[in-house]
Image (cartoon, rainbow, N blue to C red):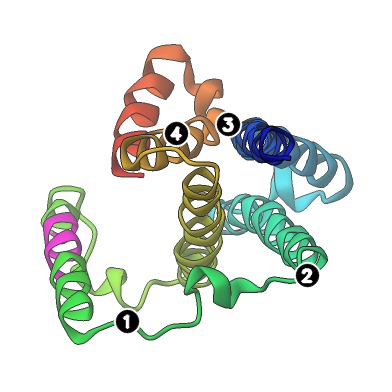
Amino acid sequence: MTTQASGIRAIGKFSGRVQCWVESVVLAVGSPVLIWGVSRLISLSVPTAANGSTEQRFLLWAGEGAVVLWSFVIVLWFVLRGRGLSFHAFGVWRLGTWPAWVVALLFTVLSTGSNLRFLPRMHVPISYAFFPPGLHLPAALIIGITGGFCEEVLYRAFLMTEFANAGYGKAMQVLIPGLAFGLSHAGYLNQGFLPWLGLMVPIASSG
């Protein structure tokens, strides 16, 4: 009886490990492939994608990734419902603690301030960072909200929890979702392998 029970636990643990690896591959490879597919569809069906202004093309580019990532989040919501869970299980809707908000805001200010110093060198008014003309602000909001919510839910909250539940140590819980996050930016391969590698490594490391 004991042997049978331990065998069931071992099979369950093994299937859980296979499942979290499959989920990592789906997110790492599936998202750039789907973004490429959506991009091709838009370029063939929306004339603005090829002939529009820089702002219009940038907005469409931002929308392509947003459509795919929000689709993944919706699919995940259905998967979790099938398991009897919700995003609450990952702490997605929790407000966090005030020290965490202070740290997050501090990094935001430092990052924004660091980036602002490049604008005068490019002969771009600093006011454009806050009140940009054209469609840059909507595109930036789409990218910021999508990245801030979807990527954190998919690659951090979900994948890290899956690896934790499968019995992996903290190092694997951080490294593999981070690597999957980096590989999900394979769309930058159109800039060449070395430029993509230069982007993927820091993206994976930050993930």
Query: Gap in Å between the C-alphas at discs 3 and 1?
Result: 33 Å
Q: Determine the CA span between mark 4 and mark 2.
A: 25 Å
Look at the image and give the residue range highlighted in magenta: 109-116
State the image coordinates of residue 116 (x, y, percent, origin top left): 16, 61
Quadrant for the N terminus, please. top right
Q: CA distance from mark 1 to mark 4?
A: 25 Å
Give me the disc on residue 81.
Answer: 2
Question: Counting residues from the N terminus, which is met first, the one under dot 2 or under dot 3?
Answer: 2
Within 10 Å of disc 4 (Cα), the crowding (few <14, some 14-19, many 20+) is: many
Which of disc 2 and disc 4 is earlier in sequence? Answer: 2
**In this figure, which residue is indicated by the disc labeled 3?**
187
Label 3, secondary structure: give it.
helix
Could you tell which of marks 3 and 4 lies nearer the N-terminus?
4
Magenta: main secondary structure: helix
Q: Residue at x 32, y 81 (%)?
A: 96
Q: Which residue is mark 1?
A: 96
Residue type at mark 2: give it.
Arg
Q: Residue at x 29, y 43 (%)?
A: 206
Q: What's the residue type where badge 4 is placed? A: Ile
Question: If the image is split into quadrants, where does the C terminus sit?
Answer: top left
Label ID, residue 156 = none
Task: State the CA–CA distance, disc 2 to disc 1.
Answer: 24 Å
Residue 26: x %, y % from top left: 69, 36
* Residue located beneath label 4 in the image: 176
Residue 88 percent coordinates (x, y) = 56, 77
Q: Image point 43% across, 32% down: which residue?
A: 179
